[in-house]
Amino acid sequence: MKKFLLTLTVAAAFQSLSAQEITLDKIYSGYYRGKGIAGITSMKNGENYLVIEPTGIAKYSYKTSQKEGNIVDGQFESYEFSDDESKILLLKGSQPIYRHSFLGVFDVKDLKSGKTLSLNDGKPVQEPRFSPDATKVAFIVDNNIFYQDLNSGKITQVTEHGVKNKVLNGLADWVYEEEFGHARLYEWTKNSNAIVFVKSVETDVPEIYIPIYGKTLYPTEMRYKYPKAGEKNSVVSAHIYLLDGGKKTKVNLDNFKNYYIPNVIQTSKPDEIVLITSQRTQNASDVLKVNTKTGEVKKLFTETDEKWIDTDNVTLEFLDDNSFLWGSERDGNRHLYWYDQDGKLKKQVTKGNWEVTDYYGFNPKSKEIYVQTTEKGSINKVVSKVNIENGKSQLISNAEGNNSANFSKNYNYFIETSSTAAKPYTFVLKDGNGKTVKELQNNNDQLQKLKSDNFTEKEFITIPNNAGDQMNAWIIKPKNFDKNKKYPLFMFQYSGPGSQQVANSWDNGNGIWFEMLAQKGYIVACVDGRGTGYKGAKFKKVTYMNLGKYEIEDQITAAKWFGNQSYIDKSRIGMFGWSFGGYMTSLAMTKGADVFKMGIAVAPVTNWRYYDSVYTERFLRTPQENPDGYDKNSPTEYANLLKGKFLLIHGTADDNVHFQNSMEFSEALIQNKKQFDFMAYPDKNHGIYGGQTRPQLYQKMTDFILENL
């Protein structure tokens, strides 16, 4: 489950707008739209980088920051180089399937000869990937793996028996894609001699049926396999395909954890692949090395945790000598550990009461790794380089805000993308020590428009909970804030495991809507309570087996704390949330009915029994093992407590959090004779967008707030 925020889509160019206030019309016209740089990729020489521009894939010099022309002309959605940069894979058009998966039409251009080959004869494919020697591209069609020889154009079928809703080869099923975070489950070996893939048999996985209304006389159906908590999952197995002879061999995983196989990873050795596997409880994962010549499997090590492992957030990076870096929370914070090629721990590389949030690469010359961390506070993300041998660290980004980096291949330069809650995104070219070379792009125009319309900056504070923790929070006050007045409070949160909403970063989404609400006389606030991320494993994992219990306690505590402030009207406190945040809002309006006057829950889970197996069981185990963890934290159990004004919103074609959740909660409210408002969005998925859907949705929510808070 991932958070959903307001996306600022562009309806048309915006003209002649009145100043001095933020409006939904301005938001949805694109008036406040920010600018960015798309598709930044360093070339192997470390002296040039590429970006996607309207006219093609443009080449720039790091040293001069000047454009040196296009390496390919045309309009493309994305691109990917072969390892030797002799060829480029170009996405010309795509059609989304689920969160990460899509059907795409691709060309392969040979940059030496200038010749272009249409992959799969121009027909759509999924998950194409160059072989390391750049002579072939593997891809998936109709749940089977193929590869195409780029010299002859010949297409070879690798797997058979792929059938929708039955067998998938090299492709994640719905729950793998959603909860492990990627759609591709195959990989080439480094020598291009073999493909290792995961086969998923989902025949026994229960199927969900979703009506699609459209404009037909009879609704059609969307059907797909969706394993809910405690139900059967796909039966997975790993296989080796040898290109020489076309022989396929099943990898024997009987002696290892093999319920899930979330990751297939290429190592630095020619005939080797690593599989990361997990048991169903997701509190232990095996890291397995597979010899693709012999089929032999060797366990490098097992990662364990008394609660859960973030199986959706794996960091495993192989260095040139086949030693590797591994991300783990074993010391209470997420840090990097260095192992030799046989799985023996060499050392812990990063240490401290902070977390590594991203890994960018390793410079073998300087022996330094490049990472993003929270070492300057949990609401900030900064970029550092750390010597892998002596642990010496140097901050090379801004010291506050949200900073990320895209490095040149030789690590002599990087492009820093940065923002704060008060400053939109800037793109700055820096040298390897963090010295600014040139600002490439800023969003001063966006900020000036907002300031002209009375934008106010967020204030960051901490609020105590009943367990003795200090919870991060932000607050937006009206421009003409008067401490002697009392204001209604509108609280936003998401609250899901490991998430973060209280961050010192620019919010191009709901943030501008929140500014609009502040201009209408509301104080808007957000609190990250127990269960959220970047404050250590203990704070995050206290919710284990009781998902929702401590999270809603902390939101109620925060609302009471705000209500005790002289400038807050404690009789006028409301809450809004989407997805997990909608679940929390539903609990706030029932378990917290004496505190919250109004709530808006969008696409909420209302009973974890209805959500998918991988996500839910990671935090709750199965309903068979932990029935109270499911039922005692479900808002349907507390429907009789509803008092305030409640708006429930859901898309009927939500493939993630099924419409069923809101239907069950509605029935519970009805049977308790509770009055509430409900809005269904026909054929809309978890994001609820398309056409004029978002403007209508946010106008409806705005009106509901103005009328009831």
Image (cartoon, rainbow, N blue to C red):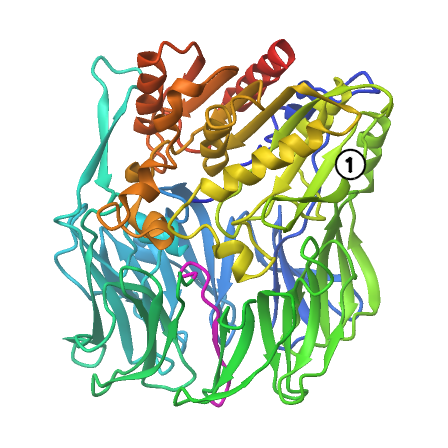
- Up/down of 615 relative to 660, above or below: below
What residue is at 60 percent from the left and 11 percent from the top?
708
**Quick check: 524 left or right of 567?**
left
**Viewer-proximal residue, 332 or 48?**
332
- Up/down of 152 relative to 447, above or below: below
Is residue 149 visible in the rendered image? The answer is no
What residue is at 35 percent from the left and 36 percent from the top?
632
Is residue 694 visible in the rendered image? The answer is yes
Q: Mainly helix, strand or loop, the magenta region?
A: loop
Q: Identify which amino acid the numbered label 1 is placed on.
A: Gln
Residue 601 location (% of width, % of height): 48, 26
Give the total number of marks visible in the rendering. Answer: 1
**Which contiguous range is marked in magenta?**
310-321
What residue is at 62 percent from the left and 85 percent from the top?
388
Q: Which quadrant of the view contains residue 524?
A: top right
Query: Quadrant of the image for the N terminus?
Result: top left
**Quick check: 185 left or right of 82?**
left
Q: Which quadrant of the view contains residue 69?
A: bottom right
Q: Is residue 555 magenta?
A: no
**Viewer-proximal residue, 91 or 613?**
613
- Up/down of 640 relative to 430, above or below: above
Q: Which residue is the site of mark 1?
A: 446
Q: Is residue 317 magenta?
A: yes
**Quick check: 625 left or right of 99?**
left
What residue is at 72 percent from the left and 77 percent from the top?
412
Residue 195 location (% of width, % of height): 28, 73
Residue 60 location (% of width, % of height): 70, 63
Label 1: state its secondary structure. helix
**Quick check: 88 left or right of 417?**
left
Q: Which quadrant of the view contains residue 393?
A: bottom right
Query: Quadrant of the image for the C terminus?
Result: top right
Residue 171 location (% of width, % of height): 29, 57
